[in-house]
Amino acid sequence: MITVVSLNPAIDKTYRVSSLQPGRIHRVTKVEASPGGKGINVAKVLKRLGIDVRVTGFVGGGTGEALLRGLERMVIPHRLVRIPGETRTCLNILDEAGRTQTEFLEPGPAVPKDQWEALKETVAELAEGSRVVVFSGSLPPGLPTEAYRELVFIVQSRGAKAVVDAGGAPLDRALEACPFAVKPNGAEMASLFGKEEMSESERLKALRDWNRRGIPFACVTLGEGGALASAGGRVYRVTPPAIEAVNPVGSGDAFAAGLAAGLDRGDGLESTLALATAAAASNALHLQAGQVDENQVASLQEQVKVTVLSP
């Protein structure tokens, strides 16, 4: 069983337009809307991969009710804590001519202290029956930057493996709790070290340093460039299959889902990295974030190349 903690979920809405031109009226050619936010996307991918998954986090208002109905349609069990305010809506505009995507991400509602305490109790209970707990996405207003740090301690004290997919100060503080696995993207890792960009050698050094700090599995995703990982005394370069992406939004979430699935099943490290990369590629072949095809993932996994860079 995998539990996904989504502290700032959303209704994700995708607009497809022929050409995005600022200041002009646009006719939307296609609209997609579904429960989203990084954590919910992780759960959707896990469900499509046939993994037992459940979700916790915060939900509020009419948008929150729509999110709950969406989870029920997808048959994803949930124990979401209700809060005042309105669950956020996030908009992604796909420009067909320019082959770009433009995102508008709302901040989300503030979380009162009592509801934060209720969430911590819920996470503790769910961790008891979980092999893996995934923490993914931004923090909503009202939560301390050490929120993930607190939750990782709670989860791992109950025997589950914590996987953290976040950035900024929340990730920095979470590292102090030594989660089993961390998976920032390239921009998030660079920002953590006060840089605009990092070389491969700098990234690998950071991953090894995280291992030495007590984090067994450290990984950074690099979009079309694949991923780098360090675990078990080895470092790896992961090369994804060549694809014609439809919408890459959510591919990092799909990678986190594949990583969690491999850990839950007890797969080997290289197999887990290949599964995570294949899930990310399958997501990029779909219009809506968090959508993968299990058979397609299996086919793509065979095309992923995992190279050991050094012992």
Image (spheres, rainbow, N blue to C red):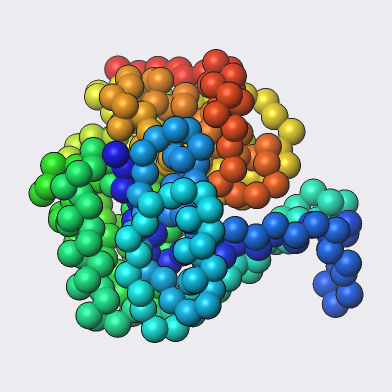
Q: In the rendered image of this protein, does residue 208 appear above or below residue 123?
A: above
Counting from the top left corner in percent of width and height, residue 111 is at 34, 78
Counting from the top left corner in percent of width and height, residue 294 is at 55, 29
Is any part of residue 199 visible from this angle?
no
In-image side of 120 versus 165 (left or right) = left
Residue closer to the observer: 71 or 136: 71
Residue closer to the observer: 29 or 98: 29
In-image side of 105 versus 110 (left or right) = right
Q: Which quadrant holds residue 216?
A: top left
Q: In the rendered image of this protein, does residue 130 appear above or below residue 39?
A: above
Viewport quadrant of the C terminus: top left
Q: Which quadrant holds residue 296?
A: top right
The number of callouts visible is 0
Q: Residue at x 55, y 16 (%)?
A: 302
Q: Residue at x 13, y 42 (%)?
A: 159
Residue closer to the observer: 229 or 148: 148
Q: In the rendered image of this protein, does residue 230 appear above or below residue 256?
A: above
Q: Residue at x 31, y 74 (%)?
A: 143
Residue closer to the observer: 193 or 274: 274
Q: In the rendered image of this protein, does residue 151 appear above or below residue 25?
A: above
Viewport quadrant of the N terminus: top left
Q: Residue at x 87, y 51 (%)?
A: 97
Counting from the top left corner in percent of width and height, residue 284 is at 64, 40
Q: Which quadrant holds residue 146?
A: bottom left
Is any part of residue 95 visible from this angle?
yes
